Amino acid sequence: MDRVLNNVKAVSMNEMQRTLYLPRFLPYRLTKLSGMISRSLAAKYSALFDLTIAEWRIVALLGSNPGLTAREIAPLASLDKVSISRAVERLVKSGRLEKRTVEGDRRSAALFLTQAGQSTLAEIIPLAQDYENQLLAEFSPEEIEQLDNFLNRLDATAEDLQEG
Amino acid sequence: MDRVLNNVKAVSMNEMQRTLYLPRFLPYRLTKLSGMISRSLAAKYSALFDLTIAEWRIVALLGSNPGLTAREIAPLASLDKVSISRAVERLVKSGRLEKRTVEGDRRSAALFLTQAGQSTLAEIIPLAQDYENQLLAEFSPEEIEQLDNFLNRLDATAEDLQEG
DNA sequence: GGATTAAAGTTTCAAATGAAACTACTTTCT
DNA sequence: AGAAAGTAGTTTCATTTGAAACTTTAATCC
């Protein structure tokens, strides 16, 4: 009579569960997992580069998409405009980012990595990849693909549930 | 030449990636996913029961483990003692929790749900299970088991990486 | 064309967070 | 037993966060 992820599917229908087993509750597990991962990455980036996660995301995005504006970054990095504004301010101050007023719309600024920003990114990338590889070290390529698939589906479902 | 989760395993060895594709970076995906889920659950609990996530976890734990102390709750709920102290204070104020001084150690208090606390829990459980079921609606029992397995392994690995 | 509405980013302000200090007790050591 | 060290839980305080208000510029409406 194993419960899997608290999912009722897995328990017979006429004995509805009266308890919720927290350590198997999917939202709890995801929060705990992502918390552990984020904390250790945040500590690493902060210690080595004095970068927050928001700054790190923005640098990573601008590496492959130079010239994005704050508004465009928001959905790509899952950051709100306040966080972006603050992260950009810090990145400009630390000389890693440059703002160029957008031709034809003086409200927004296109963002570009400076040389310093690009070398920061060059240092950051292998570190991030290492970390991901360590997380997935015990996973076979097939399992990685399956995990990828699961995450995509959960993400899509969670997005739907946002509205509903 | 598909990248899977940015994992280097999936790209040939002599073309190391110079970019990091954020939307496929596992830590980012987990943070985004857990953020979406937590926000929608938090909104629901707050609106319907005036409960925070921390309070919710404590209530859920005490349902199956009456008499836990704050210190015992901490690792089970992944909460620090400050959060627990505050959540317990609110739960006591709202009449859902009762503190009883532990026989033989007057520093700690054993925590118990009151009748009100138990009926809150009884309302909360099906809601939580519904939510989890909705998230997993498109998953077959085998897939759910596999997801469970993946999460366990990632959790264990992440815990190891905390120290290292 | 001037007024109105909207959009991009920034700033402000109030609430949430969590590390460190603190209080009240308990255990250990001599 | 009494001092020293340790633990449970609370409080304080400084930082982080994000919603709402604001500023500047652009688009739309009459």
Image (cartoon, coloured by chain):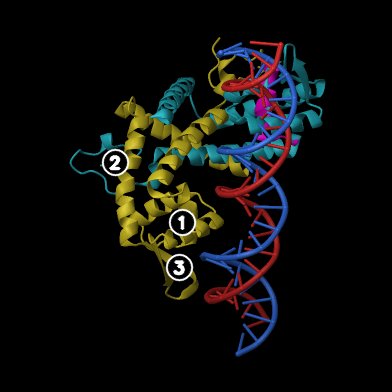
Chain colours: A cyan, B yellow, C red, D blue
Q: Amino acid at mark 3?
A: Ala
Q: State if disc 3 and disc 1 touch (CB < 8 Å).
A: no
Residue hosting label 1? B73
Q: Which mark is residue B109?
A: 3
Q: State if disc 2 and disc 1 touch (CB < 8 Å).
A: no
- Report the front residue among A98 and B30: A98
Q: Could you tell me which residue is drawn at 32 percent across and 39 percent down?
A: B129
Q: CA distance from mark 2 to mark 3?
A: 33 Å
Taking A44 as reference, is A30 left or right?
A: left
Taking A24 as reference, is A79 left or right?
A: right
Q: Chain of mark 2?
A: A
Question: On the same chain: label 1 and label 2?
Answer: no
Q: CA distance from mark 1 to mark 3?
A: 12 Å
Q: Could you tell me which residue is drawn at 37 percent across and 51 percent down?
A: B60
Stretch of the chain drawn in magenta: A50-64
Q: Amino acid at mark 2?
A: Asp
Q: Could you tell me which residue is drawn at 51 percent across and 51 percent down?
A: B79
x, y percent for residue D8 = 52, 65
Residue hosting label 2? A2
Q: CA distance from mark 1 to mark 2?
A: 24 Å
